[in-house]
Amino acid sequence: MTSARQAIRESRAAGQLKVLAKVPAPALRVLAGVRSAGLWLLEPFDYVGRLINGKTYLPPLAIRREAGPLAGLEQSGGEFAAYLKLLCGLSSQSRVLDIGCGFGLIGLQLKSYLQPPGSYTGLDVSRQAIRWAARHISSTTTHFEFVHLDIQSSAYNPGGAVPADKVEFELPSSSFDVIVLKSVFTHLRPEAASNYLRQVQRLLSPNGSCLATFFMFEPHHNRESKARPPTVDFRFGDDTWRYAVREMPELAIAYARPNLVEMIATAGLSVKSMYCGTWTGGPGCLSYQDVVVLARSEGDGPEQGRATVELAKQR
């Protein structure tokens, strides 16, 4: 479970979104470029720190920052490796697909755990993160591989060649026992999210499980009922999906829970379990974002899911 300290750190990061909520897109890109340049300038000092603390297995500061708040980053990777074991039945023989893997944050946690025929495949839009992971992880661990996907994202890869709602992951069907998408759907618009869910359905083995994180909200939900207000203010959008930054929605996207469940079913998947995130301000939550565990629906694919949704509507 996410520690109180980690929740505070992530809440602070969410606070940055409030500051950026109405900043024009060109200014956002300039700010991102300035921050990246500054982090690379700090790399010599960061490397000395990693050397002193025995953490040279981690990538440079600028690459780590792409994966999320720097404080507690390793803890987050260990947290999700544990969730995969507890909630998805991950074993040392599992075939794992990590969509949005970054530099291999979760992969590093599984490096000594997964053994052939178990395997790990990481996909990400960050070319520099994938390059680092291939050089420092898969070069010495042959059952690990990292693949760069040149997918368009206004926030993370504006010059990408393939729209997120059109991309197809060129991997064999039913070839993964466990699929994880940590903080991926929180950056996808509805059409792209639906496509990713279809890709998950195709790639997941019949008895496999997928763990994904989301920001979910209840339509017309009463904030006064919460112990404290949500840490992210999704002020733009409608009752089906919302976003926190007007000029760059992909920075943080939330879905209405009923609509998300329908999207999941339409893709031919079913919800095994849902766990609220501490971002909501509610008690008894599992991690910072909402965690959803998925499986393939009974039937041959998305058509079965659509039939299930229609039947539910008729009832």
Image (tube, rainbow, N blue to C red):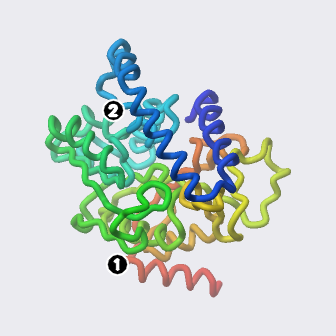
Secondary structure beneath dot 1 equals loop
Which residue is drawn at the image coordinates 49% and 84% (left, top)? 307
Q: Residue 4 appears in which quarter of the rendering?
A: top right
The numbered disc on residue 300 is 1
Q: Amino acid at mark 2?
A: Pro
Nearest the eye: 13 or 184:
13
Q: Position of residue 241 (x, y in %)?
A: 64, 67
**Horizontal side, residue 152 vs residue 273: left or right:** left
Q: Position of residue 92 (x, y in %)?
A: 26, 40
Would you say residue 207 is visible in this rendering?
A: yes
Q: Amino acid at mark 1?
A: Asp
Of mark 1 and mark 2, the one earlier in the sequence is 2
Which residue is drawn at the image coordinates 39% and 33% (left, top)? 40
Instruction: Examine the rendered structure and indicate whether residue 170 appears above or below residue 244.
Output: below
**Horizontal side, residue 26 vs residue 180: left or right:** right
Instruction: Examine the rendered structure and indicate whether residue 117 appears above or below residue 105.
Output: below
Which residue is drawn at the image coordinates 49% and 73% (left, top)? 191
Nearest the eye: 9 or 310:
9
Secondary structure beneath dot 2 equals loop
Would you say residue 178 is visible in this rendering?
A: no
Instruction: Examine the rendered structure and indicate whether residue 232 appears above or below residue 284.
Output: below
Q: Position of residue 270 (x, y in %)?
A: 48, 67
CA–CA distance in space, label 1 to label 2 = 41 Å
Which residue matches tag 2? 59
Q: Quadrant of the C terminus?
A: bottom right
The numbered disc on residue 186 is none
Q: Position of residue 272 (x, y in %)?
A: 50, 59
